């Protein structure tokens, strides 16, 4: 059964916000990355790669590649990414040399010509690299892997450091999708988060990308930033609708200054209230819908002809560490410092320290710091959680066929926990299915959390961003 279009209903009231709007995972994976253990190391990762080479797991499907470029010229106060702030561009030369070593290790482990259908460069800011450096990296990836002719090549672009002419050079290298980090167009909000950029710079990049025939352009926005108000954010949404990118990601700001040092520059007193944040989200969702965007799930919107929207309508939507994807569930290689991968039923994360990551590579070993080999229970719960996050619907028969279990018996306790949510109108417990309602999409993360066996205590939730 193909999912029906997502329609968000009236946003939840104060009681529902208090009960279900607290911290919770974003579920780009299950189990989530905070459950990875140091007992999983380089040897375990090598065995997972060997299992893929032998044809086990999802080896029949082309892989995805994620390459992490950690460098930024300046710090954005809201940022929770793993980054290195520097204006010394020569540091990228040493980093690329180490990346080449990491690519070679994978080349030997998987064999020359492992198929790849998607490449994504994230950061940090990948456009910190020069054109020559990016071209060298693209060439090496093409040498090591059998990249499909119609593969997705996506890159995160900082509008402050890239112009229309640079987009032409990126397109010539093979990049056919780009994501622009905008966050907010209001000058006062931009000053508060130390990321000032003009509307005109974004407009020029979107226009040139369209002229170049890139497959997809995406704008990233954040609601809940300091100095934001529903009225100001509504102006940003209007401008973005006018620019009409193919995709819009509407993230919620997570203020966690104890974990992320740059956020200590933000005065918590300037942050919008929970009610204001919810108003921003509700207003933005309504305006984007009126402008012709389809709600893909949680925080993503796309025009009807975009690949994400098509995948959503056809029931092919997937979710991984890069967010929503139209690619089928497949192995993901994470390359670079702190990068996360998923291979043959195992998760892995590279060393977060540049020194430790580089030291492992110089010694000829995978720079894996931690990871997890998923149990059968993990895989079953992942199936359920991803169905909720991507389709907004869990069919018991599908779970029975895929996981060889009786959903109602195996998850009786979880289904009972959903009943209060059903009473609140957030989910519908149909015969043989769980369905997220229009209002439930605002708290879909909380609905998914019911099936997360690792979240047993409220104290464990404090490290996550708020659902609302």
Image (spheres, rainbow, N blue to C red):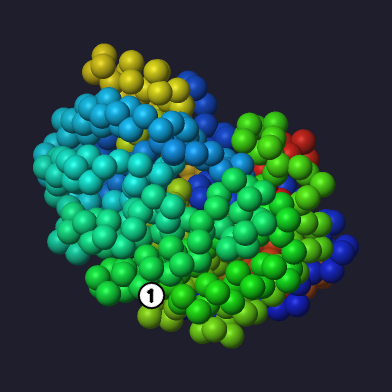
Outermost residue, right direction? 15
Q: Is residue 145 visible?
A: no
Categorize mark 1 by other alpha carbons within 10 Å: few (<14), some (14-19), many (20+).
some
Front residue of 348 and 385: 348
Q: Position of residue 84 (x, y in %)?
A: 46, 31
In this rendering, the answer to whether 184 lies above or below 463 is below
Front residue of 455 and 173: 173
* Image quarter hosting the C terminus: bottom right
Residue 299 falls in which quadrant of the image?
A: bottom right
Front residue of 172 and 252: 172
Residue 129 falls in which quadrant of the image?
A: top left
Residue occupying image coordinates x 40% and y 23%: 354
**Residue receiving disc 1:** 306
| Image-based side of 381 in relation to 457, left or right | left
Q: Position of residue 226 (x, y in %)?
A: 71, 52
In this rendering, the answer to whether 310 lies above or below 75 is below
| Image-based side of 377 in relation to 434, left or right | left
**In what element is the residue under mark 1?**
loop
Q: Position of residue 250 (x, y in %)?
A: 57, 63
Residue occupying image coordinates x 63% and y 31%: 261
In this rendering, the answer to whether 107 lies above or below 413 is above
Residue occupying image coordinates x 21% and y 56%: 169
Q: Is residue 298 visible?
A: yes
């Amino acid at each position: 059964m193909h999912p029906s279009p997502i329609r968000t209903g009236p946003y939840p009231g104060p009681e529902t916000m208090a009960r279900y709007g607290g911290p919770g995972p974003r579920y780009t994976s299950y189990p989530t990355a905070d459950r990875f253990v140091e007992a999983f190391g380089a040897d375990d990762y090598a065995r997972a790669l060997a299992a893929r080479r032998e044809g086990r797991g999802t080896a029949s499907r082309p892989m995805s590649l994620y390459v992490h470029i950690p460098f930024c010229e300046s710090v954005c106060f809201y940022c929770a990414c793993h980054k290195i702030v520097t204006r010394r561009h020569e540091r990228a030369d040493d980093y690329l040399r180490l990346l080449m070593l990491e690519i070679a290790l994978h080349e030997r482990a998987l064999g020359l010509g492992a198929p790849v259908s998607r490449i994504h460069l994230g950061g940090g800011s990948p456009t910190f690299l020069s054109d020559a450096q990016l071209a060298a990296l693209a060439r090496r990836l093409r040498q090591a892997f059998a990249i499909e002719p119609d593969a997705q090549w996506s890159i995160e672009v900082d509008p402050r450091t890239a112009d229309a002419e640079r987009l032409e050079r990126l397109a010539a290298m093979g990049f056919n999708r780009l994501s622009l980090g905008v966050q907010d167009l209001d000058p006062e909000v931009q000053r508060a988060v130390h990321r000032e950029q003009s509307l005109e710079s974004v407009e020029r990049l979107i226009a040139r990308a369209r002229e170049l025939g890139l497959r997809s352009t995406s704008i990233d926005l954040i609601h809940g930033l300091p100095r934001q108000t529903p009225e100001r954010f509504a102006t940003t949404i209007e401008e973005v609708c006018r620019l009409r990118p193919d995709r819009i990601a509407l993230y919620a700001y997570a203020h966690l200054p104890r974990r992320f040092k740059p956020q200590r520059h933000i005065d918590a007193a300037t942050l919008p209230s929970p009610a204001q944040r919810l108003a921003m989200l509700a207003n933005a969702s309504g305006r984007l819908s009126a402008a012709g965007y389809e709600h893909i799930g949680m925080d993503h919107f796309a025009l009807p002809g975009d690949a994400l929207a098509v995948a959503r309508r056809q029931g092919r939507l997937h979710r991984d560490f890069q967010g929503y994807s139209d690619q089928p569930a497949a192995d993901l290689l994470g390359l670079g410092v702190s990068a996360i991968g998923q291979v043959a039923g195992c998760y892995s994360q590279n060393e977060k320290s540049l020194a430790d990551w580089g030291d492992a590579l110089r010694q000829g070993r995978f720079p894996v710091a931690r990871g997890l080999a998923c149990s059968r229970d993990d895989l079953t719960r992942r199936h359920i959680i991803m169905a909720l996050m991507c389709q907004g619907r869990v069919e018991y028969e599908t779970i029975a066929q895929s996981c060889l279990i009786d959903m109602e018996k195996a998850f009786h306790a979880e289904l009972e926990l959903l009943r209060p949510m059903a009473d609140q109108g957030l989910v519908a417990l149909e015969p043989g299915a769980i369905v997220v309602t229009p209002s439930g999409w605002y708290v879909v993360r909380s609905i998914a959390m019911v099936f997360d066996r690792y979240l047993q205590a409220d104290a464990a939730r404090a490290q996550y961003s708020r659902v609302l």
